[in-house]
Image (cartoon, rainbow, N blue to C red):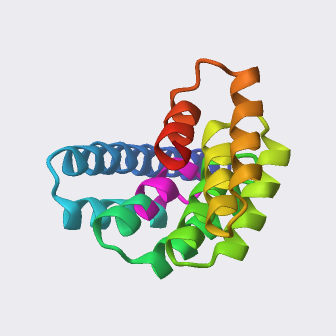
Amino acid sequence: MKKEAMIETQETDAKMHVRAEKKEALQTQAAAAVQKERWEEALRCYGELLSVNGDDCAVYLGYGNCLLHLQRDYAGAERVFGEAAERFPENRQAAERLAHVALRRGNVEKAQSLYAALCRRFPDYPAAVCGHADTLSAVGELEQAVVLLREFLERFPDSPMAHSTLVTTFG
């Protein structure tokens, strides 16, 4: 009986090693495809990675970003970022990407709610503050948006993203 258990353990270890090698190869291939602007290949790689590596938020973000920026599949990107935000609630980038997609899809109310919540949870995250300012601007609350950005810049004067948003959006 012990011999069978040892063989089973060795087989399990071998399968895990093969799986790890496959994940690493797919991650390398996905990164190379994005760098060379081979978007269909990147989407395929990230899709395969999701099936073997659903416990890595970066895989969700890579796949969602490909859908969002490269394929203009806003509904698909929203679904992927939503799954990532749900599975990885401490990952601020997943929540920010979800809010960003809502804004790009024209759902300003949802984006505003998501960005406001993100700012409360991560008050030092420039993407959340800038996104929230964009949603405030979209609903005509320009003064509130400017105040939000200026208060953020008082705390983080070296934030290029906040400076850029303030200057380009609000002059």
Left or right of 156, for residue 134: left
Task: Give the residue at x 38% y 69%.
Answer: 67
In the rendered image, the vertical position of residue 168 relative to residue 4, given as above or below: above
Task: Give the residue at x 60% y 46%.
Answer: 3
Task: Give the residue at x 58% y 35%.
Answer: 162
Of 149 and 67, nearer the camera is 149
- Give, as a single range, the part of the protein colored magenta: 52-64
Q: Position of residue 155 (x, y in %)?
A: 76, 22
In the rendered image, the vertical position of residue 64 relative to residue 161, given as above or below: below
Of 103 and 147, nearer the camera is 147
Of 16 and 66, nearer the camera is 66
Q: Position of residue 146 (x, y in %)?
A: 69, 44
Please say whether residue 47 is visible from this viewpoint: no
Please say whether residue 133 is visible from this viewpoint: yes
Q: Main secondary structure of the magenta part?
A: helix
Residue 25 in which image quadrant:
top left
Task: Give the residue at x 67% y 47%.
Answer: 128
